[in-house]
Amino acid sequence: MKRFVNNQKGFSIVIVLMLLALLMILGFAAISMANNQTRMVSIHQQREQALQYAEAGIHRYMAELSRDPNFYATTASSDMQDIDTVYEDGYFRISCSDPSIDNPYIILTSTGWHKNSEFKRTVEIKLQKKDLLQNAITTNTGSDVLWYTNRYIRGDRIYGPLHINGNLIVSGKVGDNFAGGEGGPRFYGKVTYSGNYIVEPGSWFAVDTTWYNPEYNTVDGAVKPEKVPATGMYSMNENLKLEADSDYIFQGRTCIYLNGTSMTIRNKNGSSVTKTIPENGIIYVKGNTGNNKWGLETANVFISGVLEGRLTIAAENDIYITAGDPTDWSQPSTTAPSTGGVTYSDLVGKTFTPENAESLMADCNDMLGLVANRNIRILHYNWPKGDGDYYWKRSLITHYDVAPYNINVHAAAAAVTGSFEYEEHRDGPKKGDVTIVGSIIQNRTGPLAGYSVNFADLDNFFDIPDPLHDRLSGYGRTFVHDPRMMYESPPSFAGPKHSGWEMVEWQEVSNPVVAEP
């Protein structure tokens, strides 16, 4: 027994073998862990690369939108979609849904993967257009507080967002017999301002819940004004001149009558010529600036008619919207026409109201842009003739009133350093209504009517006579925002500096092709 216990030669071998086995197990475990770690690192790298390539597709498409805000509607956009696009050591595939009146966003999806990997990742973003055209009216500044033209006043109806960088001033307890006899303005959309909010004496609230005055209106659902930072304003888009075809660049006074897909143009004192809408949709008028309204070298545009297609007209001075054909230089009638302006072909013969604007504009393919370095005006007095002069009643030392009773302006209109206004708004008789379908961008709030003194806005107990409550001259105004301008714009209207798309939502979505690890 004693010799058995002291004989340990075989026991040592067993211990050594057990240690070797343990080391082998630990070694295999370490190798397995290293392999798994390497695999996990590789998978992580592949997944990160897939995400990187997916986002590369997003940035590639957004770069095109930054150059052309309407890129999504082009053939080049379609050609970019639903194909495997090489990027570094992998690929991306993008697709997007076009915006619409019901959903004015671009939904852009991009899937990325490494060329040696089956792992794919998909990113979906929501893009919203950032553009002043998203407002029915955008104004840089008003006038001084005592001058009424910077107010939103009796009879005004604004169907769509409004923003003013300066003071928001509302006025009008009582008004003329306009829009059902209601006094005061009505805002059917978001209202923002960057200066002060000023309610003049006698301004009132109404049962209508769209009246926003928070001092008087406690009705639930009222749209109230919001103070926000000032926004940047348009400058004259130099690209318009560079992009315009030489056959559509004119020097000096230019009269244009739109007639569907064609138009009659009469430049300076020349003869009328007929042209089609330019392929890139741009007309540019250059020349002298200043107050020489009828000068042959002054870069003014006189325009009216019906547009079928898409067109932007830019003038280095003023644009005048007329009642009749401004290329017909016959002596004007002594009776002002009943209607006039610029209208869309797709709206001709249809009853347009603010309530059916969305449905009608969804089927409208026409879009006009008017860009004036100074003012955009409704022509009130006199008429051009061939010698650079104009028709007026010299014998009576009076003027021809050529402004129509009612007028339509279907356009995005930008008065870069001036206003959208009615020429000589305090003179002449009281007219009907001006109906704007589109968007107005102006440096200063422009007048469209002449009113009595501000005493008319005081409460009734002041016993102001009724005649002082009326609009004395000019037009009642109804602004209806073109809902397509939440995502569209006329050709090269503003340029990429002032118009673009911004990301409002980002999310990664599951990839149905390859399961996530």
Image: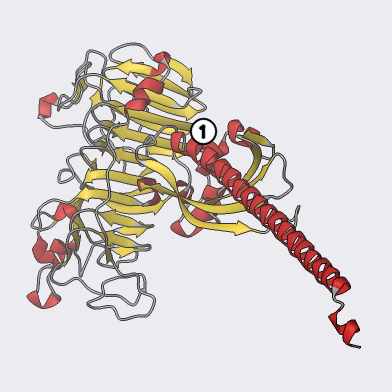
Q: Position of residue 309 (x, y in %)?
A: 51, 32
467 in relation to 248, above or below: below
The reply to whether residue 494 is visible in this rendering is yes
Q: Position of residue 108 (x, y in %)?
A: 58, 48
Residue located at (33% from left, 17% from top) = 250
Q: Identify the image quadrant of the N terminus.
A: bottom right
Q: Is residue 34 left or right of residue 310?
A: right
| Three-letter code for the amino acid on which mark 1 is drawn | Glu
270 or 228: which is nearer to us? 228
| Outermost bottom residue | 1
452 or 52: which is nearer to us? 52
| Residue 336 image-quadrant placement | top left
The colour scheme used here is secondary structure
Residue located at (59% from left, 50% from top) = 48
Residue located at (13% from left, 32% from top) = 398
The reply to whether residue 97 is visible in this rendering is no
19 or 372: which is nearer to us? 19
Q: Secondary structure at mark 1?
A: loop
6 or 89: which is nearer to us? 6
The residue that label 1 is drawn on is 308
